[in-house]
Each structure stands twice: as structure tokens, then as C-alpha cells.
């Protein structure tokens, strides 16, 4: 009887210990999605050298953690997180989870599968992302907020569990795909971080993607081209047309491209047209603006072709969002459906040209 009681007591002690969470500083684990390691803090996207060079909004948006993802391995039955965001930002057309939450994926049979989200409660957050799992070794990827910065992050696991470096080199980190673009590319307005189209494409390709999206500010700032050129990419994707006006494209697009091309003479560069925003069927001014911009970016593209530039490609936006009008939140920024449709259009073209 005493042995039975002792066994039961030990069982309860073990279960109690397992139920306790121990948090580990995320700085111990690999971080994907950065164009440079020379940022002021770990979870920023731009090098500190641009602090006094870039326009203020570009610099501020560079502190958002869009496209960054943490990789780790654990046999814990529970995965939790503590994180503090920079701004505690809110917007009326995007979910708090997309803005400042976390998104956990697990690698199963070579593919990334959604586990659950870490939903934010404010500036300082703690959330159990998933519980009651079998105590098996799994590879995880945790996406960081799209429209806020991260000042601290730690991962919680069972006190008796292990958390370690990933053992699988996926997504492939050599020669990432580098994206430049607007609020949409930054992730507006995905419901959760994993649904930003660059993150979707990264999972589908199983290759690291770098998100240099700057909400309202993809104005072909040349120092951003320098940052892109500093990455030995497999493909560069230029999706600036929704922000840059006609004059800016005429003055800067060639220069922006040339900075990249001068350092990577053979790497494929993909241009995209302005999306045919869903409300253009009603808003004549926006429809005319989109048409003018797309005419301009195609003229820039053709001028590059005529002077002999190779390995450059243009993706038409004609069918990007479908034709049912359901792919945006506000006529412009993509819903998850819009993000999926973009990825379905763009991903096969990137895959075709990866070198």
C-alpha cells in the first residue's frame, strides 16, 4: 500500500512539474528573414547605419518585425511565449494578432503546418499557444508580428521538456528570396503573421524569404536597394508600384534596379504591376491611377529589356486578386484570401527562376 501511495505521489509530482513552464530567451535560437545582422536590436529589419540616412517613416517601419521567424525544436507538450512589442499598435482594418501577435507552425513530412497563434493582450504579452500534445520531438517555426516591433521574446516549454536548435535545415537559408514592397507586402492585412504572402511563399518553397515591405513608403529609396544588394539572393522581387507615383518610378526605378544588378549580374529580378484593386470597378479615379502606374512600370521594364538587361521578368496583375471582389479588407489591403491568391500567382514564377 505504501509503495502504491508513493508511486501515485511520484506520478502527481511528475505531472505537476510537466505542467510548469520554463521560459527560454529566444535569442538562443536562429532568426530567419533578416537582410542584415547589423541592426541595432535583434528584431529590427534594417541596419543601424541607415538610422541617419533613411526617411523617418522608412526607419520606423524597419523596426517592425514583418517576415521574421524563429526556429527551434522541442518535445514539450505545451508551447507558450512571452513577448513585448514596441508600440502596442492598433489599426481599424487589421486584426491584433496580425499586427502584434505570433504564429506557430510545425514541420510535418517536409511541410509546414499551422499549429496556433499567440494572441496579444497589449504591450506585454504571455500566451499558451498550444497544449496537450504528445511529448514528441518536433521542429517549429514561430512568426513574429507584422506591424509592430518586438523588444523581447521568450519561448515557454514544460519544465521537464527539452528545447534545442533545429536539426532540419528548412526553410533553406542559402540564397533567400528578397522582396521589396508596400503595406501589402509588409503583411497588410493578414489575419495572423503566417498569412502574409511572403511567409506563405517561404513555406511553399521551403526557402527563407526576406520581407522588406514598408507601409506607404515603397518609394524606391536607393539605400534600400543597397540593403537588398547586400544579400546573396536566389531571386529579387520588386513590388513597389502601389506606393511609388509615376514621376518617382520614372526617376528612380532604373537606378534602384541598377544598384541590385551591378552586384548581382545574373540573379533573376521580378517586377510586379499594381494590383487591380477590388474597388476600381466603381472608383474611377483609382482605376485611372492604377492604369497610369502600370503603364509606367511596364515602360520602365521595356526600357531595361531594350538596353539588353537579362533575367528580368514582369508579372501582370490582371488575375492577381481574382474577379469576385472578395480579396481585400478595404478595396486595397489583402485579406487572407488575397494573400493566398497573390502567393498562388507569384510562387510558381519565383520557383521557376530560383538559382
Image (spheres, rainbow, N blue to C red):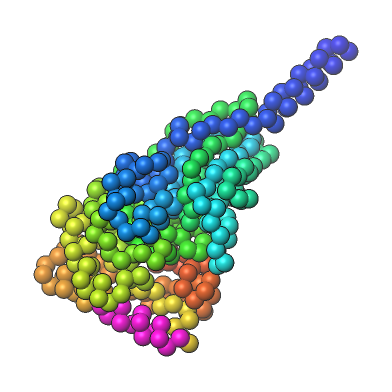
Against 314, residue 4 (above or below) is above
Magenta-colored span: 283-296
Residue farthest top in this picture: 2
Q: Residue 132 at x, y = what percent? A: 68, 39
* Drawn side of residue 105 relative to residue 67, left or right: right
48 or 116, which lies in front? 48
Q: Residue 197 at x, y = what percent? A: 44, 60
Whether residue 267 is in magenta: the answer is no
Residue farthest right in this picture: 1
* Drawn side of residue 42 relative to residue 104, left or right: left
Q: Residue placed at 51% from the left, 79% from the top?
A: 324
Q: Quadrant of the N terminus?
A: top right
280 or 168, which lies in front? 280
Q: Residue placed at 53% from the left, 71% from the top?
A: 329
Could one spot residue 307 in this view of the protein?
Answer: yes
Residue farthest left in this picture: 307
* Drawn side of residue 14 relative to residue 304, left or right: right
Q: Residue 191 at x, y = what percent? A: 55, 60
Q: Residue 151 at x, y = what percent? A: 48, 43
Could one spot residue 136 in this view of the protein?
Answer: no
Amino acid at each position: 500500500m505504501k509503495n502504491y501511495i508513493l508511486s501515485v505521489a511520484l506520478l502527481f509530482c511528475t505531472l505537476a512539474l510537466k505542467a510548469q513552464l520554463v521560459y527560454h530567451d529566444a535569442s538562443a535560437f536562429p532568426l530567419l528573414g533578416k537582410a542584415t545582422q547589423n541592426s541595432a536590436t535583434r528584431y529590427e529589419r534594417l541596419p543601424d547605419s541607415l538610422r541617419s540616412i533613411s526617411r523617418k517613416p522608412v526607419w520606423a517601419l524597419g523596426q517592425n518585425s514583418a517576415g521574421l521567424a524563429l526556429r527551434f525544436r522541442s518535445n514539450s507538450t505545451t508551447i507558450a511565449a512571452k513577448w513585448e512589442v514596441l508600440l502596442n499598435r492598433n489599426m481599424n482594418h487589421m486584426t491584433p494578432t496580425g499586427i502584434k501577435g505570433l504564429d506557430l507552425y510545425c514541420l510535418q513530412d517536409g511541410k509546414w503546418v499551422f499549429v496556433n497563434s499567440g494572441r496579444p493582450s497589449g504591450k506585454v504579452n504571455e500566451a499558451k499557444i498550444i497544449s496537450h500534445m504528445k511529448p514528441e520531438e518536433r521542429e517549429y517555426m514561430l512568426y513574429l508580428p507584422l506591424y509592430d516591433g518586438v523588444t523581447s521574446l521568450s519561448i515557454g516549454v514544460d519544465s521537464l521538456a527539452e528545447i534545442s536548435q533545429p536539426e532540419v535545415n528548412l526553410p533553406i537559408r542559402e540564397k533567400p528570396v528578397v522582396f521589396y514592397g508596400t503595406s501589402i507586402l509588409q503583411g497588410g492585412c493578414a489575419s495572423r503573421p503566417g498569412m502574409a504572402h511572403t511567409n506563405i511563399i517561404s513555406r511553399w518553397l521551403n526557402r527563407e524569404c526576406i520581407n522588406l515591405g514598408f507601409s506607404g513608403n515603397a518609394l524606391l529609396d536607393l539605400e534600400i536597394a543597397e540593403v537588398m544588394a547586400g544579400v546573396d539572393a536566389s531571386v529579387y522581387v520588386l513590388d513597389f508600384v502601389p506606393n511609388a507615383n509615376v514621376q518617382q518610378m520614372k526617376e528612380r526605378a532604373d537606378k534602384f534596379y541598377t544598384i541590385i544588378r551591378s552586384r548581382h549580374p545574373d540573379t533573376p529580378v521580378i517586377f510586379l504591376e499594381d494590383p487591380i484593386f477590388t474597388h476600381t470597378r466603381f472608383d474611377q479615379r483609382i482605376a485611372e491611377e492604377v492604369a497610369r502606374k502600370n503603364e509606367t512600370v511596364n515602360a520602365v521594364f521595356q526600357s531595361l529589356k531594350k538596353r539588353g538587361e537579362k533575367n528580368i521578368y514582369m508579372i501582370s496583375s490582371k488575375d492577381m486578386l481574382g474577379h469576385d471582389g472578395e480579396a481585400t479588407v478595404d478595396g486595397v489591403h489583402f485579406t487572407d484570401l488575397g494573400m493566398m491568391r497573390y502567393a498562388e500567382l507569384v510562387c510558381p514564377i519565383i520557383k521557376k527562376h530560383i538559382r
